[in-house]
Image (cartoon, rainbow, N blue to C red):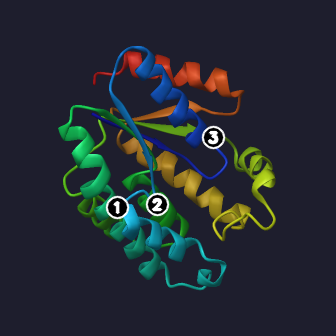
Amino acid sequence: MLVTFEGIDGCGKSTQAALFRDHLSAKGAETALTHEPGDGGDIGRAIRKTILLERMKDIDPLAELFLFCADRVHHVETVIRPALEQGKTVISDRFFDSTVAYQGYGRGIDIDFAAAAARRSALGVEPAITFFLDAPVEVCLRRLENRRGEGADRMDREAGAFYGRIREGFIAEAEKQPRRIKVIDARGEERETHGKVVAAFERADV
């Protein structure tokens, strides 16, 4: 089973993905925690480094979309599919919904085109459940302040309007696919949000 965590930068999905992995592991499940972009071996790491370089800020949106899709192909082939075949529950910090939200709604690429490319790059792998961690843009931007400065990449430095479009994109996709995408209020403390994730998982038909 593949479980994915989605949301705009600063929503807390990396923390929640790790907490959820720990929750399942404590119950005896075999798990694998992974992330996009960059967790697809040497090729994935090279693509991630390229995507996030500051000098790539003027990259054409379509080229950016294909870089993320190329990363996903290797991620699925080298990490996700082997773990699924071993019977593990795979928990991924981002998957194809991020491409739809960021490059489609955020960058302005045709939504149907972005969605088709994103899903094709998943090579037929579909999340059983997706948690969209939703918090207002201003809340997420405040959280990102700790990542500003020399350690910040170009995505961290995007403007609030960009993240606003992405958030609306995630909301729109959740409305289209309510069975798979569960909206989690992520404005609160880490443990509060974790409790909401676990409760939603236990209610879900997966």
Residue, x 50% and y 72% (percent of image)?
A: 108
Residue 95 at what x, y percent from top left?
40, 52
Vertical placement of residue 104 versus 170, above or below = below
Q: Secondary structure at mark 3?
A: loop
Q: Earlier in the sequence, mark 3 or mark 1?
A: 3
Count of numbered badges drawn on the protein: 3
Q: Amino acid at mark 1?
A: Arg
Image spot of residue 135 (x, y percent):
66, 40
Residue 147, percent from left and from top: 75, 56
Q: Quadrant of residue 117?
A: bottom left
Mark 3 is on which residue type? Answer: Gly
In terms of image quadrants, where is residue 16?
Answer: top right
Q: Nearer the viewer, residue 20 or 78?
A: 78
Q: Is residue 164 left or right of residue 144?
A: left
Q: Tell me the SS state at disc 2.
A: loop
Q: Is residue 46 shown above or below 28? A: below
- Earlier residue among tags 2 and 3: 3
Is residue 109 visible in the rendered image? The answer is no
For the residues marked 1 and 2, what is the alpha-carbon distance in whole angstroms?
7 Å
Give the amino acid type for the residue marked by disc 2 in the picture: Pro
**Disc marking residue 37:** 2
Task: Pick out the residue farthest to the front.
Answer: 42
